[in-house]
Image (cartoon, rainbow, N blue to C red):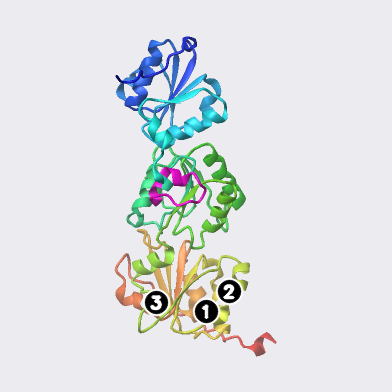
Amino acid sequence: MSPAPIALYPDLRERPVLVIGGGAAAERQVRALLAAGATPRLGAPTLTAALQAWAETGRVQWLRGRFDPAWLEAVCYLIAASDEPAVNRLALQAAAAQRLLAQAAPGTADALAAPKAADAAGDRTGAPATTAQAQALRPGTVTLVGAGPGDLGLLTLNALQALRNAEVVLHDRLVSAAILELLPASAERIDVGKSASGHSVRQEQIHALMLEHARRGRRVVRLKGGDPFVFGRGGEELEYLRAHGVPYAVVPGITAALACAAYAGIPLTHRAHAQSLRLVTAHCKESFDTLDWAALAQERQTLAVYMGVAGLDTVRERLLRAGRAAQTPFALVENGSRPQQRVVIGTLADLPDTARAHQVGSPALLILGEVATLATDLHWFGAAPLPAPPSPSPTPAVPTLAHAA
């Protein structure tokens, strides 16, 4: 004989009872609660047709969305009846923390008592789940997602799934509008972008927002342009989450150097031109001063310089002083992989002047080395590369130690 759908108590009449879930199991619990004279409240993103009808007629109160511990504040009883075991477990744990009477709906108890390995592993901060995607989709988890350079087609399948299941998204300024359109309509979007000349959100504020929403049991996505671990402060954010006991996952993205080079027809390595690749960032004076310019000036290598548009004069000066040839080719890829992509080419001697002549703006990636010349013949996406102006400025004298003395 099947168990009763709910253990009835005499004091349930006219008392608020919270049911978590919007599927068939939740529908059975609500039906029983209505028959017992209770006042059901229903927490779920979507509902069955019958539950929807009860909500529209006012027989139940629908709390739309994923489980929120705040829902427990004005109820006397909780029934976990979600189709997702992890959501049930989260609700029951929150109820236990508040000493609220609660139970799992029939058919869900086994899943709660012995969760799948993927869910169990994720209860330990930073511990690997059976699959990375299972780790990323649990409530209360922060997932760092690389959005790539902007082309929607370069988003990975794991990134797409994380976005579609997100409840709160903290996104950077350079994440394309096309990617943001993939988010559920119910997802809360928070712009936490940084800009050298405009509004910026301090890193400490981003940390606090991640912690706040994760502790409310939400699926949080920290959405970054490119890859979270390539000049994206992903390491700092994971260190903060681990220090505060928040589970996390990482979905890599295609970093700008790879995408911009590919869409500009520039192989970053080539047997005839470059046997090594260096990724550097040049967004402020402090970053310039920490770079090993002598190593960066070596031949037969490719430099990919991130966030360097504002510092092109300094890049030219430091590389020439360190011995890089003035005729070294470069390519500036603006809005790489996006419909408005532009590629500007020239030589190191005229790098900042050529960029100013073509009004190159952010986001743009600098590729410097012999491989940059291949953009002229190998370009395939967008317009042909733009050359230096007809009357370039005089080649600057290479600074020497005598100049510095």
Dot 3 lies on which element? helix
Q: Which badge, 3 or 2, comes first in the chain's sequence?
A: 2
Amino acid identity at mark 1: Leu
State the residue at coordinates (58%, 51%): 240
Q: Name the residue that disc number 3 marks.
A: 372
Quadrant of the rendering where the N terminus is positioned: top left
Query: Given the current orientation, which residue lies at the most extreme front position?
Result: 1
**Other-residue count near label 2 (Cα within 10 Å), few / some / many at <14 / 14–19 / ≥20:** some
Amino acid identity at mark 3: Ala
Q: Find the distance from the CA under tag 3 to the CA under tag 1.
A: 16 Å
Q: Name the residue that disc number 2 marks.
A: 291
Q: Is residue 198 above or below residue 24?
A: below
State the residue at coordinates (46%, 41%): 219
User: Is there a contact, CB below 8 Å, between mark 1 and mark 2?
Assistant: yes
Quadrant of the rendering where the C terminus is positioned: bottom right
Magenta stretch encompasses residue 123:
yes
Pair 3/1: label in front:
1
